[in-house]
Image: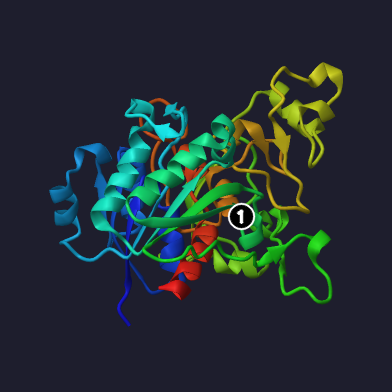
Amino acid sequence: MKKITTVDLFCGAGGFTEGFSKAKGFEPLIAIDFDKQAIGTFKHNHRNVNAVCEDISNLSKSDLLTLTNSKKIDVIIGGPPCQGFSLAGRRLLNDPKNQLFKEYVRVVDIFKPNIFIFENVVGLTSMQGGLVLEAICEEFKKIGYEVSFDILNSAEFGVPQARPRFILIGTYGSNPIGTPAPTHGSNVNLDLFSNLKPQVTVKDALSNLPVIEQGQGKEEMSNLTPLNSYQEMLSGTRKNNSLYNHRATRHSDKIVDRYNHMPQGGDIRSLPEKLRTKKNNVFRLSETTPSRTITCNFRTDIIHPWVPRGLTTREAARLQSFDDDYQFFGNLTRKARYLTQDDQVGNAVPPLLAKALAQHIKEYL
């Protein structure tokens, strides 16, 4: 069978393409991002894809067609930043704040894929009372697409993380196809007649990783034996028994004491008054549920369930559903203008969510 060709816009470290690769039957042709470190990570893990480090607005129609050898593009995937949209009524203005989204529309219009998937933050649905979403849908309709959208929670697709994301799927010249049905459910919605699998928990995801204290770890070490099917699935195919990016940040004694007193599932408000800070968005993971949303600040804001420290890049990547041998490159702290390892993981589309989307549209195509 002919493989389904894809283009990945604003690709970051490659979570979207990774999920599509796992779905089988897809041929990623190009991936584009302006960040040097993210593209370095993408290239290392997807060596057969033409990963381009460039501001998409600098790529003309001729450039894009050359990069894809003028091949027919079946699917475009990606999620441009959409903060601060500028509107006039229900119309998107030609404002720099709208530029990256308009570039996404421009590229979709150039390639005219059968399907595109536009991924973004949940807050997009309520921006300016819903007018932004109306304007976005209208932009896609202008170039011939029917759209459907929903909020999908990654935990309902096998990711050990309760990460809600806005997903909009556009189909060219045909009826909308909706979004995929959940494959996993919480204990609340599971019963004898349910065909849903149990959601993957933090313990399911992290329990076999080498235990390291704050300030310890390495960029490369040997993996340990998987203890369950999720860990087996992520054990990796690129290099046997390899585990990358498992280094923990060193904390002060005062911070370690604070983390020690924080119970699983608790936050700053769970602490004795003398240990609290003004920063309330620090949370300790509970081993019995999926993780809360992994942000780019997981070294300071998301605390390991069993060790008094923030997460390592690898632990966050496990909770995002990246394989253990998916290697991230870059600094651990923001000493340069490029994305850190943590930024790349926190910004990524969880590969298992991307895989579910790929399987859904493959049935249509």
Residue furthest to the front:
89
Horizontal placement of 329 versus 306: left or right? Answer: left
**Residue 361, horizontal then vertical, whole percent:** 46, 68
**Residue 242, horizontal then vertical, whole percent:** 47, 60
Quarter holding the N terminus? bottom left
Badge 1: residue crowd in 10 Å (few <14, some 14–19, many ≥20)? many
Nearer to the camera, 19 or 259 = 19
**Residue 355, horizontal then vertical, whole percent:** 50, 64
The residue wearing badge 1 is 154
Horizontal placement of 138 versus 151: left or right? Answer: left
Amino acid type at image mark 1: Ser
Question: How many numbered discs sit on the rendered protein?
Answer: 1
**Residue 133, horizontal then vertical, whole percent:** 50, 41
Horizontal placement of 138 versus 224: left or right? Answer: left
Quarter holding the C terminus? bottom left
Residue located at (69% from left, 30% from top): 282
Residue located at (44% from left, 42% from top): 136
Nearer to the camera, 136 or 166 = 136
Residue 10 occupies quadrant: top left
Nearer to the camera, 240 or 340 = 340
Residue located at (54% from left, 38% from top): 124
The scheme the figure's colours follow is rainbow
Residue 326 seen by the camera:
no
| Mark 1 residue element | helix
Residue 155 seen by the camera:
yes
